[in-house]
Amino acid sequence: MRFKRGSKAALMGAAAVFSLIHWDAPAIAASDNSTDTYAGDYTGGSLPTGTFIALQYLGYSRANAFVDPTGHELPNSHANIFEEFTRFVYISQIGGHPFAIEAEIPAATLTDVNIPGTNSLVAGGFTDPVVHFTYFFISDAKVQRWLGFSNYFYLPFGRPFDNQRAVNVSTARQFTDVPQIGYTEGLGKYSPALNGVFFDLVANASFHTDGNSPLVVVNPASSPLPGVLTFDTLTQSVSYDVRAFLRYEPKTFLFAALGIEKSWGGEQIATNGRFAVTGLPLVVPQANLPLSRDDFLRGHFQFQVPLAPDFALAADVFHDFDRVGGFKNDIGVEFRLTKFFFPQVASR
């Protein structure tokens, strides 16, 4: 690079000033990690072939802190998080085993957002749609044992990612593949005192492709160092999630469950960063910038009540005991309405 006479000292001075500036993480990209599987969902492998299910979810959580990737809780950080999605399920068969085909159309937004060091702007709207499939290796209602393998595909077709907003509900144009194992065991066969008690285990891993252009920060001319900070790529490590529930189901579609969930991994890092100084032919490379992680410990209380033989209302009340990276939920609740369309039995 060639400089005009007298500009070298100015460039060196700008570089010195730049080296004293600390950049916070001014953008939080969504992470498509784990799934929204409830306690007892894998017993759906015993539903009749040809059953169609429509589900509607509506949730709210109150985050009383934002925790950066190092575990530091930002002072006076908070947000209200709203989410809803519509889900459809069809139960078919492959090789004599139940096979579920599913699709989801989700949306989310945040209000009352405050993340110190950012503009606190939110890009809400439709998030990444999901298609998924579940094959049941075991689906035995008589011995009360179910084992299924699912695969979820999160597609980056939701709201366009806005790299100048502090919070995005969509990913930075990432595909995510989530293989999942679900296992349910009825405990009544081991002791009459445990009739109606079930153990549910759900475990998965989320594999993320790289994201595009996760961050752009424009420093105005009035700032100490005007210019544009950009990062070209978002990398994300594998996210892991395990959930275990003890569920009491005295009759069909009526249950209450206590569960614990642990998630870890999924670190998001903005890479290929550079800062272009306004009015000077100077581009300064930037170190990689950690943004967030999928690392939390969460407790769940879930219940479901039948409103009709083919209609049920469920809820999930949850609390984050610990969180590293992202919003820590003090309290959250999600409601789920489920409508079953059972196949008609041919009359003789």
Image: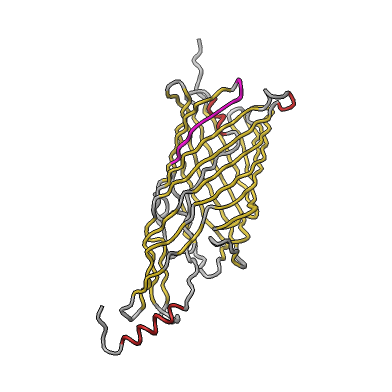
Q: Position of residue 106 (x, y in %)?
A: 48, 46
Main SS type for the magenta part?
strand
Q: Position of residue 57 (x, y in %)?
A: 55, 43
* Residue 27, above or below 178: below
* Residue 314, above or below 83: above
Magenta residues, start to end: 142-152
Of residues 25 and 58, the one drawn nearer to the viewer in this rendering = 25
Of residues 196 and 290, the one drawn nearer to the viewer in this rendering = 290
Point out the image quarter for the N terminus: bottom left
Q: Position of residue 325 (x, y in %)?
A: 54, 58
Residue 147 on the magenta segment:
yes
| Residue pictured at 26% horizontal, 86% vertical | 4
Residue 280 on the magenta segment:
no
Q: Quadrant of residue 222?
A: bottom left
Q: How many marks?
A: 0
Of residues 66 and 49, the one drawn nearer to the viewer in this rendering = 66
Q: Position of residue 77 (x, y in %)?
A: 59, 65
Asked whether, in this view, residue 71 is left or right of residue 93, the answer is right
Q: Quadrant of residue 316?
A: top right
* Residue 7, above or below 128: below
Of residues 316 and 176, the one drawn nearer to the viewer in this rendering = 176
| Residue farthest to the top, as pictured | 348
